[in-house]
Amino acid sequence: MRIGIAKEVKPAEGRVALLPNHVKQISSKHEVIVESDAGLLSGATNQDYVAAGAKIVNTAESLFSGSELIVKVKEILPVEFDYLKSDHIIFTNLHSAADRPQLDVLLERGLTSIAAEEIHQYGSPNCPLAGEIGALEGLRLTLASHGGTGRHFFPHYGAPACAAIVIGLGGVGRGALRTLLSLGVQVMGFDNYDGALFRSKLDWPQDNFTTHQLNELAALLPQADMIVNCVLWDKTRDDHLITREMLKTLKPTAVIVDVSCDTAGTIETCKPTSWDDPIYKVDGIRHFCVDNIPGATPVTASQGYGNALLPYVNDIADFGVLEALKRNPWLAKGLTTFNGLLTLKEAAQVQQRKHTDLSEILNSCSG
């Protein structure tokens, strides 16, 4: 199979789907094509890819036209739409429920697309990085020089430490906790899953960390210098944990960091931003809602992402996409489009489209 590694076109996105050490584990059996400089910001040169057995092409058009399986990090953007063909297998983070134009094109072309964000049995390896970097950005924005409350993250000289709220204590939330608690911040962690609350308290049994149920959130918001949202919100819901009305209860110098970045999701006033223009205000409250936070550390993030994708890429290349889907239930969870059919239930619900059950695809097709 011809496997293409595309250069990301999203602004300030330096990650790459597979690094040379991953390519080396594929290239003995399959042809690997890499778009020129795709890995440069992740510490991988064209020469590194060639040494691993890959072929370099100079343009995205050449990469897409010469590849069957195309692996990426971020969604397919409009500038890439014209490159898509019916025989492509696209494997990347699609987030298609919130992106109707992208899904329109995937269905219109009749290609196979697999959402990488759906395939991780134990959470994406980039999730902890997102939580860690998001927490650091939040701390930066609590400094008075950036419009924050001006509290230090350590409780020096009898003055209280910065107070943070972390919503959701899964992979992203634990990354945020790891950063904030190691720096001495006073943290309140919120979740409704008793297992997450118990594990977090077990891992951080210290005086500067308390755990709470989500129904306590509204009452404690006024205490926060920073709020870090790590809950991935169900896109079919129209309610919120933090409403616009609740912003009135926050300190005017507080900052909201929405790592999950669901438009009007956990936080009603959230909308995605970029690293070029990361912050906006609603009712005077600063919001940091960059939707590709791990892209700030591409060297580390690409290694983790590639490690997670590699086994699935090998299976698709070795056995074909349908057999790979049958062999790997978690890979099958990510199937989004196939032959013009929409198989991802969430996208169908949000966009009110016809949904084809995955079992119909797998049972009607032989490997």
Image (tube, grey):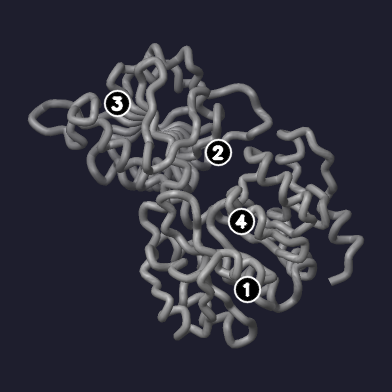
Q: Earlier in the sequence, mark 2 or mark 1?
A: 1
Q: CA distance from mark 3 to mark 1?
A: 47 Å
| Residue type of the residue flagged with mark 3 | Asp
Q: Earlier in the sequence, mark 3 or mark 1?
A: 1
Nearer to the camera, 286 or 161 = 286
Crowding around mark 4 (Cα neighbors within 10 Å: few <14, some 14 to 19, many 20+) is many
Where residue 118 appears, x then y in whole percent? 63, 52
Q: CA distance from mark 4 to mark 2?
A: 15 Å
Tally of marks: 4
Res. 129 visible in picture:
no
| Residue type of the residue flagged with mark 4 | Ala
User: What residue is drawn where x is 28% and y is 21%?
Assistant: 253
Q: Nearer the viewer, mark 2 or mark 1?
A: 1
Q: CA distance from mark 4 to mark 3?
A: 34 Å
Tell me the tag on residue 3. Answer: 1
Nearer to the camera, 365 or 213 = 365
